[in-house]
Amino acid sequence: MATRSWRWTWWCGTRMRTSWTPTGPASSASSRHTGGPRRPSRSASRRKRLYLCVRNFVCNIGEEAQLFMALYDPGEQRMISESYVIHWASTGVPRDIELLNNLRAVFTDLGSKDLKRERLFLVCQIIRVGRMDLRETLSRKLSTGLRRPFGISVMDITDITKGKCESDEDKQHFIPVHLAAAENDFLHNMIRKAVEGKDINHKGQGFWVSLKMLWGDLNQVRKDHPHLVDRSTVVARKLGFPEVIMPGDVRNDIYLTLVQGEFDKGNKKTQKNVEVTVCVCDEAGSVVQNVIYQGAGDKPTSEYRSVVYYQQRHQRWMETVKIAVPIEDVHKTHLRFTFRHRSSSDTKDKSEKIFSMAFVKLMRPDGTTLRDGEHDLILYKGDSRKLEDAGSYLGLPSTRSPSEPRILSGSSFRMGGSVSGLAVSARDSFQISTLVCSTKLTQNVNLLGLLKWRAKPNVLEGNLQKLMNVDGGEVIKFLQDTLDALFSIMMENADTDVYDTLIFDALVFIVGLVADRKFQHFNAVLEAYIRQHFSATLAYKKLIGVLTQYVEQASRGEPCEPLLRTFKALEYIFKFIVRSRHLFAQLYEGKETAEFQRSLQRLFQTLNQLMKSTLEGPTLLSQGAALKYLPSILEDVFGIFDASMLGVLLRDFIGNLQPQRLLRQKLQSLTDIVNSKVFQSYECRDLLLRMAVPVLQDLIERGEEEDACVELLSTILEVLYMAQKRAEEDRHRERSNSELVKVKRHVQLILERLLHTVNRRVIVLERDNSLRSHYVACMAAILSQMDADHYHSYIQAFPSRPELMDFLMETFILFKDLIGKTVYPSDWMVMNMVQNREFLRAINQFATTLTEKFLSSSSFELQLWNNYFHLAVAFLTQDSLQLENFSQAKRTAILAKYGDMRAKIGAAIRDMWYNLGHHKIEFIPGMVGPILEMTLVPELELRKSTIPIFFDMMLCEYQLTASFSRFEDEILRKLDSEVEGGRGDEQYKQLFESILLSCCRAHPELSRPGESFVALVTGLLERLLDYRAVMNDENKTYSMSCTVNLLNFYKEIDRQAMYIRYLYKLKDLHISYENYTEGAYTLLLHARLLKWSDEANTAPMQGLHSPSLHTQRQLKEALYNQIVNYFDQGKMWEEAIHICKELAEQYESEIFDYEMLSEILQREAKFYEKILKVLRPSPDYFAVGYYGQGFPTFLRNKVFIYRGKEYERREDFEMRLLSPFPNAEKLQTTSPPGPDITQSPGQYIQCFTVQPVEEPRIRLRDRSIPEQITNFYKANHVQKFSYSRPFKKGPKDPDNEFANMWIERTTFVTAYPLPGILRWFAVTSTTTTVISPLENAIETMMKTNEKILSEINRHQNDPSLPINPLSMLLNGIVDPAVMGGFAKYETAFFQEPYLEEHPEDQGNIERLKDLIAWQIPLLSEGVRIHGQKVTEDLRPFHERMEQCFVQLRAKVESQYGVREMISFEDRRSGRPRSVTWGPDWERLSHARDSTEAAPIPKPTPRNAEAERRENRSSTFFSYRRPEPRQSASELPEPKDDRRRHSRSVSESGPGSPDGKQPPPSRDSAGAQPGPAALSPTGFCGRVKSASKAPPLPRRISPAVYETFLEGSDAANGGKALPSLADGSKGLKSPPPPPPPKSKRLSQL
């Protein structure tokens, strides 16, 4: 049963979602007829009711009050419901104490129109009952019992009634009270103003109410909400009829509204305080007791007194009461209105008489009730006794008519010859409004004449004709009485047919009213009448007779205007016929059955005759109406006829119509017939199917009326499915399959005629055609009802093998297309799964056909088999079958109902592959990709069963060609795209490796090549998985690393196409992050693969520029230009210049394009200019370690050197670094972590700044070079980076930290120089060196001297530079207040104890002394320049600095001698110059005892062409070589460059070949002041005695300092001192020695 219910849901769901009207076998076809009565939906028939509970009322009234609560429409400015009346005592509680906490009411009969009102309010009118004026004192006797206006309350309940906000019986709403402020404040006007939303000062006075919307009729509400609505709950009805009046709903209410009046003050000085009294009187004038209701919840009274407004000429009451007079008394009753002036004084009030009277009768002379609407009543005056005497006024006119002349004031009327004594009060007026809600009293004369037809039978024919002109609403109100009257006339005139046609037309008119949208809710009323109240046993004969007469008339071509209306009402006409016949048969025990059948058969034959007609005009319309409405009667006639006879009649009814006539109507009629009970009969179904199926086939093939065809076909399949299910249940229950066999015959008929037709139509239709999904649903439905016998017979039915092959080919292509681009949304899980289930059955059935008919060598069809494999793989890999992507609940539901279809189709693919035998080679490598895609599906058993297919492919190709290269190439190519697309995981890598290794090892000939292949694929898989894991990260840093790993891999295995593909992916990533330098280096790798030749491009071209570039020269030139642009954007102009030189050579010497040569040379010149003029900050470098098993394999426990962005702080870099790993912990130390960190499952990141170690460049030595040039090489093309960590060693000296300040320097070597194709590279080796405190002091002094020299040259070359940096530098050295460095060094190293303890440091001590001495001439030149540029306001500062320098100079020269520097003019001035160091700083740590100066090596000249070739050598993205990497713009260094020594903790280098020579003594140096000599520290100048201080030269040559370094190295026997060049320190390392106390900058 679950399957049946789901199946029904499936088909209905399909049709509903494709904008069809769902109709089932049990539903009436009339539900889609526009003319027939519509059955109300459940939501439409259920009425809404508003529940009201008054929780509390707080108001200081002081007297009793009446509260009238009602629903109010501000648009119409009137109440729409009765008022709920609450009598409130002066004590502040309900007058009936039992109602305390039980003030509940339900406003009923709220229909759809009421809920659609723009605004709706809950309104309460508060009327005080007591004195005229509350302010009057009780000193005199006052009149009481007066109803006086007090105030109103309003609340907008629109959102509650429309369901926009939740209504809850426990939620309380506060409604403030608006008090009447003046005597002319009419309550109705106050309500109108209050709904405008003006705020008032209510002072806490008001109502607390709860509101809730309830569904259903009153009985249902009481059942569903007994705690809210019970028998004591007041019911306030709507003013008017509800939307539906059910039979048995008897109502006879007249609502009277006192509208307004105008009264002259007469002989009084002020206007009257008018009170209107209303009573109901009979013909004798007696008051009818207890028929007036002030509102719901109130007891009936005999009279009603209006509210009294104080001294108003114009009164506006708008007070509504209900008059409930018994129906039998309405004709003899009237309403009497008396008017009386009320006085505040009780004495005067009692003396007041009635001053006027008006009346109106409830029934008019013609028998109809008082018209709805306003009535202007005539006011009479006279003696008060006459005014209450009915005999005096009943004969007088009661209302004024606009067309009648106004009755003059004072006119008198005579009655029966006597004077009535009443006169018309012309100055006064009075208007009322009435609304009659009665199911027994009508206001229509014609309808009344029909209802009381027996009173005047002579005018019956006219009344029947006039019924057509009666307002529909009036007829609907009296539906039951009207139908009773019609059938009574028919039954009482059974012997004559005089009234038959008129009654038939009247019945058609009434049914037509019910069919109108306005009265569609009365369907239930009409059906209830037929079922419960209809009793005309002979009506069927007359109805059939008139109906047959009309059809015959139309079939003859004669005009028959009523026939169209008759067809629209045909359903209910037949319900009357069938019900009448049933009652007749019950009464007369089945007599005249044959006669009844003959009359119906004659009617059908007449209809069939009508369908044969070829006439146009009215006949065509009649045929269309017959097609539309005839199916609506089949539910009623089924069972009256024999099934076969009814089938023949229906077949002829449709078949008699001309083939191309009314096609759409014909198909719709067939659809309605199929939906009826008739089609469930095998005999009827068989006849109709054999007529309908050929019609469908023809129309579908021609593409005509396709939407109607699809609807008919889907309905047929739906009914057949239900019939098949019933037949299967009957077989299990009765062990008979006769019904099942019959249903299968009809399925076979559909299959043979329509399956191929539908398939071809799906292929032909465009994808965006909405009908395509409908056809696919029909195709799936046909397949679902086919069993193995159907498939077998269908395949055997093909007359030839080519036709069968064409069908299979079409079907495979169609299925694959539908699977790849499904016609249903992805969230239609059920629809997609059912389609897949049926496709799977069909694919497996057709696979059997392939094996049986297309596998042998003579019959093998490669394309057919290929299509099968591609279809099966597409089926297996479709999104809707990937269960791991669904929620657990959804996955469980699918597995329980459909199972995992992937395993089934996977097994079928495997078996079909192995069935191929020797044909397998024809599918290699074509099927490698699809099989790979299948094995990547994350289903363990599927992978285990299908991965061996790969080995079978390898074996098959190997046996034929002795290799499996085609298979290998294809799987590598496909694997890249599949993994990148999201398929594959670690489990797949392991399974692939284990399964294929075991298979290969089982075959000795494939063991070694197989193992190599598996290693290759698993290596690629590992890199691809790493790449995929990070490629969608917001931070693309790690995507770049994985991309480099992949292109490395493809380069190693010589897959150039894939290598270039990932090159461009890397380039795009760099450019997206504005890494233009790295993007240029990446493109350069592609360019290096190309030649300067006109050969065609063989590798796949990438990028926007590629399509038009056909030769390698064109592509390489375009790449070079792009690379130059990127280098320019990255400020790597040196590299851009090198590319420009290569392009220039091509333009000049190869292609002779001088125009392009001119352009490229101009660009090159601009780059030279930018090098010198554009500010180019040096980047910072950071060492980053990723420790812990939580990182991906390409990061795990590795250290990388990162190149920072311009001006990027370490804090910003760390934040960027940590963002992809929010759970990572930052290590606070710089030392490498232990196993507890590296082997832990977490993530730990270590980050600290490192300094680049510049490679020695001999060709730049001995030259005065601008610092803009040298600074570039300090931070670029660097492969070594150092980090220095100070630490304490030995005894602690609190007064001098220099004595035990050691430096641990770690040098990192990266895999490739930076910058490169990445902004970071992995560290390949690490070296740790320890520097002694003395060596550190020497290094510090050298850096200080270099800084002074640099500043001097900068100011000499550019006088416009600011003086502040120079001021701070000099003052920090020469001022005794901050000069602590010299003294510290002297204390630490120049004392005898230190020399005795460290005799080996004698040379270094002399070197340090020499550096101190050589600092004096540098400082002297700096002070001189400072004196020239200092401003007057800083002149005292300069003078103080000069004094300090004089003292410092005297001290140093007296202790360490005088040094004098030689000056020579630079060849080019105007730019800052920098010293270029030939030797490395590290050689300082190996200074030998010898002080003999070594000769300065000269650069070896090199051939320019050799240099160019070396510079342009093509490498694969900077593979490491033993020699240092050369920049694209760097010239080669001399080959005789000396190697430096390095004393290291972890490693040492080769020694220096230099010999040891004894250093010259200080005395000898001082004795020869003439020529230039080398000092122990290497400065080239004069060494004088301490007593002689020659003046400083005007300019200092930078080359002198170079000479000093070289000489120092030689003088110390090649021992170099390692330096703390980077100045860096660890995060937790001991701090460096504190600076001197002054806050000025110090370089010491």
Image: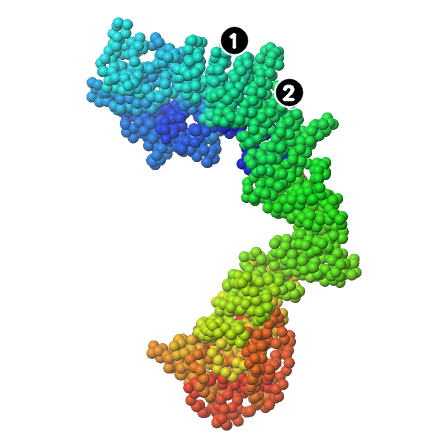
Q: Residue at x 63, y 38 (%)?
A: 757
Residue 228 in the image, given as x and y percentages of width and height: 49, 27
Residue 955 in the image, given as x and y percentages of width and height: 75, 57
Nearest the camera: 934 or 1302?
A: 934
Residue 419 in the image, given as x and y percentages of width and height: 25, 7
**Mark earlier in primary sequence (2, 1):** 1
Q: Residue at x 50, y 80 (%)?
A: 1475
Nearest the camera: 1465 or 770?
A: 770
Q: Is residue 926 left or right of residue 497?
A: right
Q: Is residue 136 left or right of residue 684?
A: left
Nearest the camera: 735 or 277?
A: 735
Q: Residues within 10 Å of mark 2 (few under 14, many from 20)?
A: few
Q: Residue furthest front?
A: 614
Q: Residue at x 28, y 21 (%)?
A: 261
Q: Is residue 1340 visible?
A: yes
Please name the residue that numbered disc 1 is placed on: 495
Residue 1170 in the image, given as x and y percentages of width and height: 45, 73
Q: Is residue 787 visible?
A: no
Q: Which mark is residue 642?
A: 2
Q: Is residue 191 left or right of residue 516?
A: left
Q: Residues within 10 Å of mark 1 (few under 14, many from 20)?
A: few
Query: With respect to residue 1186, does 539 lie above or below?
Result: above
Q: Is residue 1153 left or right of residue 11?
A: left
Amino acid type at image mark 1: Asp
